[in-house]
Structure formats: C-alpha cells, structure tokens
Image (spheres, rainbow, N blue to C red):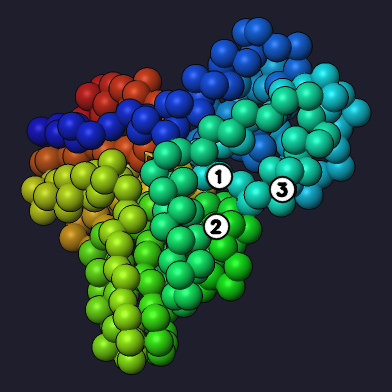
C-alpha cells in the first residue's frame, strides 16, 4: 500500500495567529476567555481548556470575573456591536480576526457604502457570515444564485470552494440585470490550495482520509470535494480509525483542514502504517 500525505497541512496563519494570542494570554494573564471556540477542532480546544482557557459564547451572561479577564476574538471575526459590548464588560479584548476575513468585511462595507447590493456566497449560520452581517447592513448571504438589479457586488465567504463560488457568480449574473458590477474573489488562498491538492489526490487514491473538526467548514469542504471522486473518511483524529481495516486499499491519501494540528495528522499516518 502506498501512502500520500498532502503538502499543504498544518494550521493556516490565521488560526496560528489566534492560537498564539491565546497561548500568550494564558501565560501572562490571570483569566482568559475566547469568544466561542477559538478553532473548530475539539482536541485543540480541550488542550487549551486544560491550560485554563474558558469559552464565552455571544449569548452567555457576562461572567462574574469579566472585569479581571482578557477575551480573545477568534479568526472568524465578530460584529462591531458585539465587540463594543465585550469591550465594555471585559478588562481587555484582543481581536484576532484573520486579516483575510477583515479584508472581506472591508470590501463588503465599501461596496454597500457605494450603493451596491452586496451578495455573498456563504453559509448564513457560519460565524464568519454572522460577523459580516453585523458589519454590513442588508448584506445577502446565500448559496443559491439570485436575480438582482442595479449595482451588484458579488463576494464569497473565505472558506468556500472557488469552483462553487465561480458557478454561483456566473448563475447569479445570468439571472440578474446589473447596471454596475463588482466581482471579487475573496476565497482564502490557503484553503483553495488544499482544495486543488485534494482533487488530484482523489483521482490518484482509492481512499482519502481528511483529518479535522466535524464542525470545520474548510475540512468538510475537502471531504466533500474528494468524495465526488473516491472513498473518503472524515475523521477528527486517529482514535476514529482504530477499528478500520486498511487492507485492500492500494493508495491512501491524507489531508487536513486549516484548524487541524500537525500532530493529529502524524498520528493518523502512524495508524495507517501500523494497520496497512
Ligand atoms: S482559512 Fe484563510 S481566512 Fe480562514 S483563518 Fe485561515 S488564513 Fe484566515
């Protein structure tokens, strides 16, 4: 059996930056919260909780120790109204929103201010899109192409598939009657590279294992893309492969989402080697 491990694995710089911020705070601060789970990965969150990190969700009651606590905003960002409230209640708020996500927010805001109808290809329940809605009034977040008129600006959630975004954009434009059009590719290049790589891997391998959180948008995307071509297992970590029989597979590929630690990928590789 041959084993291929993707070149693009490990944390992306946005996740790395948010995690480093939390780890530095845990070293120097008395009490540290993250706004929601700092990354969409159970193992990482559990490790940080063991070091003292507490998780505060947007609708939670402000904790009693808020005035003595630092709160870190994760890479997906936060609505300005929520950020203001947090700043009033916590000792200090550190905004670790990824610069690529901030750029999407800024583009959408500028287009809205210039009179465009802003339509974003994305999942309205994803935290990045919830934050965007707080930044830009009346922004349309959807995965279904719409028929629009007048000045139109088309953007994408950063973790969506570029191919899907381009199809969505083309269908929206076909159905619409724009007088002016802005079309920006706001898909994150880091996730796009993984998407291109997993497509090739799926053609070459009879099994692709995608390692990462079951609630991670970009990890689920990799699994979905590969499953169009080959058999796919999406696992949180190696423990989910204990019973799996690798015999019979000739080529196995391994890839991972941007919030999956390298160690978790390494353990999956070890498990395949010992069971193949
Ligand atoms: S996937 Fe891209 S946009 Fe999202 S946090 Fe990582 S670098 Fe930033």
Q: Are marks 1 and 2 in contact (CB under 8 Å)?
A: yes
Secondary structure beneath disc 2?
A: helix
Q: Position of residue 205 (x, y in %)?
A: 13, 46
The mark total stands at: 3
Going by the image, does 245 lie left or right of 68? left
Residue tagged 3 = 82
Residue tagged 1 = 77
Mark 1 vs mark 3, CA separation in Å: 10 Å
Vertical arrangement, residue 56 with respect to residue 146, above or below: above
Q: Residue at x 33, y 91 (%)?
A: 177
Q: Position of residue 77 (x, y in %)?
A: 55, 44
Residue density around tag 3, few if under 14, some if 14–19, many if 20 or more, within 10 Å: few
Q: Residue at x 50, y 60 (%)?
A: 109
Q: Quadrant of residue 98?
A: top left
Q: Is residue 102 visible?
A: yes
Secondary structure beneath disc 3?
A: helix
Q: Are marks 1 and 3 in contact (CB under 8 Å)?
A: no
Q: Residue at x 52, y 44 (%)?
A: 76
Residue tagged 2 = 132
Mark 2 beta carbon near ligand 1 (under 8 Å)? no
Mark 2 vs mark 3, CA separation in Å: 12 Å
Vertical arrangement, residue 269 with respect to residue 201, above or below: above
Going by the image, does 261 lie left or right of 273? right
Q: Is residue 211 visible?
A: no
Residue density around tag 2, few if under 14, some if 14–19, many if 20 or more, within 10 Å: many
Vertical arrangement, residue 147 with respect to residue 143, above or below: below
Going by the image, does 186 lie left or right of 70? left
């Amino acid at each position: 059996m041959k084993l291929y491990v993707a070149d693009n694995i490990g944390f992306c710089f946005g996740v790395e930056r948010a995690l480093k911020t939390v780890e530095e705070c845990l070293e120097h601060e008395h009490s540290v919260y993250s706004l929601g789970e700092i990354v969409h990965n159970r193992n990482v969150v559990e490790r940080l909780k063991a070091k003292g990190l507490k998780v505060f969700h947007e609708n939670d009651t402000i904790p009693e120790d808020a005035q003595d606590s630092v709160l870190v905003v994760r890479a997906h960002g936060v609505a300005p109204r929520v950020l203001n409230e947090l700043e009033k209640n916590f000792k200090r708020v550190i905004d670790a929103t990824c610069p690529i996500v901030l750029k999407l927010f800024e583009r959408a805001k500028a287009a809205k201010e210039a009179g465009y109808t802003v339509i974003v290809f994305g999942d309205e329940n994803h935290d990045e899109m919830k934050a965007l809605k707080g930044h830009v009034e009346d922004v349309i977040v959807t995965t279904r192409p719409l028929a629009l008129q007048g000045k139109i600006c088309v953007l994408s959630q950063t973790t969506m598939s570029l191919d899907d975004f381009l199809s969505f954009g083309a269908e929206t434009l076909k159905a619409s009657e724009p007088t002016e059009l802005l079309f920006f590719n706001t898909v994150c290049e880091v996730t796009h590279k993984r998407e291109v790589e997993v497509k090739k891997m799926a053609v070459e391998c009879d099994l692709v294992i995608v390692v990462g959180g079951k609630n991670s948008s970009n990890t689920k995307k990799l699994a979905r893309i590969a499953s169009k071509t080959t058999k796919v297992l999406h696992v949180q970590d190696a423990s989910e492969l204990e019973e799996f029989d690798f015999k019979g597979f000739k080529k196995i590929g391994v890839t991972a989402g941007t919030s999956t630690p390298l160690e978790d990928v390494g353990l999956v590789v070890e498990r395949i080697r010992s069971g193949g």
